């Protein structure tokens, strides 16, 4: 009997992957290619969208070969993507006008500051649910329109298109210059600062505030829908699911009930809680967002975004040369019983949730001659744990539904010392599912739901199985003392950037 599977393209910050999943949610194959990170100036991070598309064309057939399958085995294709990364391209040539500006990039601080100076911040927050920040795609789009020759004129003429990475890939897959579908899903649109988060449509007042031509924007669609049919790479296969990567993980972790929460530990760390049909406003530095839209009514979520998690381990490996592989950090950290009084605050591009200090920069405090490589390794891991604790504290305060267990996924969950530390500082159980590819699985689920491969959310919930769990074991007095020390360390990271660097 021919096996029917769903493919997911996981277009992430450092790599692009294709994964294949069967009906029970088990991964059958994966293929992956990294893409180059461009750092033209401090605070600027860029990707080549054309390189990413070339990588997609390589990883999809590689995954099929790895599973011994052919395109006719695929019933649907879904996409998960790094959300706020912004690309503009010419609809007639298919060429990007500039490198994509990634979600980590902070060059739009001047644009964001002017929004506040012009009195637009209350408008932006009231309509989009977002407090203006360099994190979101809208200011990046404005920067590209202002700085890339021909971009604004082309956009106003309808020749230049905007999208986040799922939009770019869907357009390419469904025809490109020969009539590719120009769409975005509602979760990605909710991260632009340009969408009305209640009406789920582009907002004219926000477009005016950021001076963005409506003609260049994609159509906003549900997270599970047949957007179009592949005309290249996988001819005849429907492209039928799209979710921002963190919302995809919420779906992949089967967090379908009010109060269920997950945290994905990758380049950054992102904690989302399902808030049901209620748009939960945050007074503690969290981000109200669309969790997913399957059908007519959206499910909302609260999010805490931690900019630096796994990338701190990469920095420890690559920039400092303390370890040879990322996995070695657990062994090195285990050579000492604690951090020796050392704390590392990885505010490389400012602090995100819940503090939102773009003026902060990374600091290392508490150094003495006693500190060795093991203490530094432990401080690197503990930084992720304490940042998680700050987000959970904010989420408990905002939602009124305390986190009682945390589902985790992503590459860092292979680090048992880190996961135990997260359980210890949160004082709640931490659970990892069988298979930690929740982002890709969520994209596959969305695509499969759209074509009837899976019938409903309860079928997906039944696919979730716990593979590992960590119970809190830290002495409460130690937890309180270390929490206070972490807070003091973070406060010392403030104010290193004295003024906006300009636009």
Image: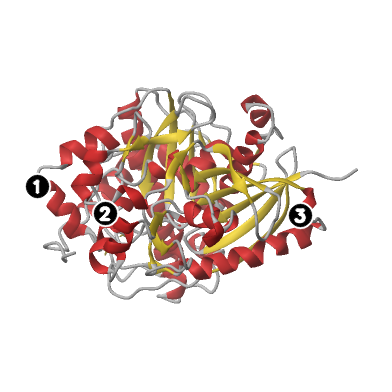
Quadrant showing the C terminus:
bottom left
Q: Position of residue 408 (x, y in %)?
A: 53, 42
- Which label number is shown at residue 139? 2
Label 2 crowd (10 A; few <14 / some 14-19 / many >=20): many
Q: How many circles with numbers are drawn on the protein? A: 3
Answer with left or right where residue 456 lies relative to residue 94.
Answer: right
Label 3 crowd (10 A; few <14 / some 14-19 / many >=20): some
Q: Position of residue 272 (x, y in %)?
A: 43, 37
Q: Position of residue 119 (x, y in %)?
A: 10, 42
Q: Answer with mark 1 or mark 3, whichever residue precedes in sequence.
A: 3
Q: Furthest residue to the front?
A: 157
Label 1 crowd (10 A; few <14 / some 14-19 / many >=20): few
- Mark pair 2, 3: CA separation: 39 Å
- Which label number is shown at residue 71? 3
Please identify the quarter of the rendering in which residue 58 is found.
Answer: bottom right
- Depth check: give the residue in front, 416 or 175: 175
Q: Residue at x 65, y 60 (%)?
A: 232
Quadrant showing the N terminus:
top right
- Depth check: give the residue in front, 12 or 382: 12
Q: Furthest residue to the right?
A: 1
Instruction: Judge whether residue 467 can be spotted in this image.
Output: no
Answer with left or right where residue 347 lies relative to residue 461.
Answer: left
What colour scheme has been applied to the protein in the rendered image? secondary structure
Vertically, is 292 above or below 414?
above
- Depth check: give the residue in front, 422 or 205: 205
Q: Position of residue 364 (x, y in %)?
A: 28, 64
- Which label number is shown at residue 118? 1
Answer with left or right where residue 51 lies relative to residue 215.
Answer: right
Asked which secondary structure carries label 1, the reply is loop
Q: Residue at x 64, y 53 (%)?
A: 230
Asked which secondary structure carries label 3, the reply is helix
């Amino acid at each position: 009997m021919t096996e029917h599977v769903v493919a997911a393209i996981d277009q992430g910050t450092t790599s692009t992957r294709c994964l294949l999943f069967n009906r029970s949610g088990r991964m059958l194959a994966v293929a992956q290619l990294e893409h180059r990170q461009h750092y033209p100036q401090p605070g600027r991070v860029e990707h080549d969208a054309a390189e990413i598309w070339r990588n997609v064309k390589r990883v999809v057939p590689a995954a099929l070969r790895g599973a011994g399958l052919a395109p006719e085995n695929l019933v649907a294709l879904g996409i998960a993507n790094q959300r706020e990364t912004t690309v503009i391209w010419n609809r007639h040539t298919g060429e990007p006008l500039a490198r994509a500006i990634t979600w980590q990039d902070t060059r739009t601080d001047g644009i964001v500051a002017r929004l506040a100076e012009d009195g637009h911040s209350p408008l932006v927050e009231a309509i989009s649910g977002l407090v203006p920040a360099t994190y979101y795609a809208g200011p990046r789009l404005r920067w590209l329109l202002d700085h890339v020759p021909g971009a604004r004129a082309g956009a106003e003429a309808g020749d230049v298109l905007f999208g986040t990475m799922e939009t770019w890939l869907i357009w390419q897959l469904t025809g490109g210059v020969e009539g590719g579908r120009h769409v975005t899903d509602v979760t990605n649109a909710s991260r632009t600062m340009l969408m009305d988060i209640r009406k789920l449509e582009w907002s004219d007042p926000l477009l005016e505030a950021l001076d963005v031509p409506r003609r260049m924007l994609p159509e906003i669609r549900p997270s599970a829908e047949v957007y179009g049919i592949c005309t290249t790479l996988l001819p005849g296969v429907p492209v039928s699911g799209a979710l921002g990567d963190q919302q995809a993980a919420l779906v992949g972790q089967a967090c379908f009930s009010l109060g269920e929460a997950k945290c994905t530990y990758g380049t950054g760390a992102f904690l989302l809680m399902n808030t049901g049909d209620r748009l939960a406003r945050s007074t503690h530095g969290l981000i109200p967002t669309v969790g997913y839209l399957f059908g007519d009514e959206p499910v909302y979520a609260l999010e805490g975004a931690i900019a630096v998690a796994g990338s701190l381990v990469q920095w420890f490996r690559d920039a400092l040369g303390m370890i040879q592989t990322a996995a070695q950090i657990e062994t090195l950290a285990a050579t000492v019983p604690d951090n020796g009084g050392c704390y590392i605050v990885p505010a490389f591009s400012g602090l995100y949730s819940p503090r939102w200090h773009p003026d902060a920069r990374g600091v290392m405090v508490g150094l003495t001659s006693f500190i060795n490589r093991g203490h530094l390794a432990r401080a690197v891991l503990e930084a992720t744990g304490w940042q998680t604790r700050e987000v959970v504290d904010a989420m408990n305060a905002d939602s009124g539904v305390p986190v009682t267990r945390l589902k985790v996924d992503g590459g860092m969950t292979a680090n048992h010392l880190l996961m135990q530390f997260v359980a210890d500082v949160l004082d709640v159980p931490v659970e990892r599912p069988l298979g930690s590819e929740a982002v890709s699985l969520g994209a596959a689920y969305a695509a499969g739901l759209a074509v009837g491969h899976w019938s409903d959310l309860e079928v997906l919930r039944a696919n979730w199985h716990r593979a590992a769990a960590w119970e809190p074991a830290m002495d409460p007095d130690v937890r309180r003392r270390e929490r206070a020390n972490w807070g003091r360390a973070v406060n010392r990271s403030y104010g290193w950037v004295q003024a906006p660097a300009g636009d």
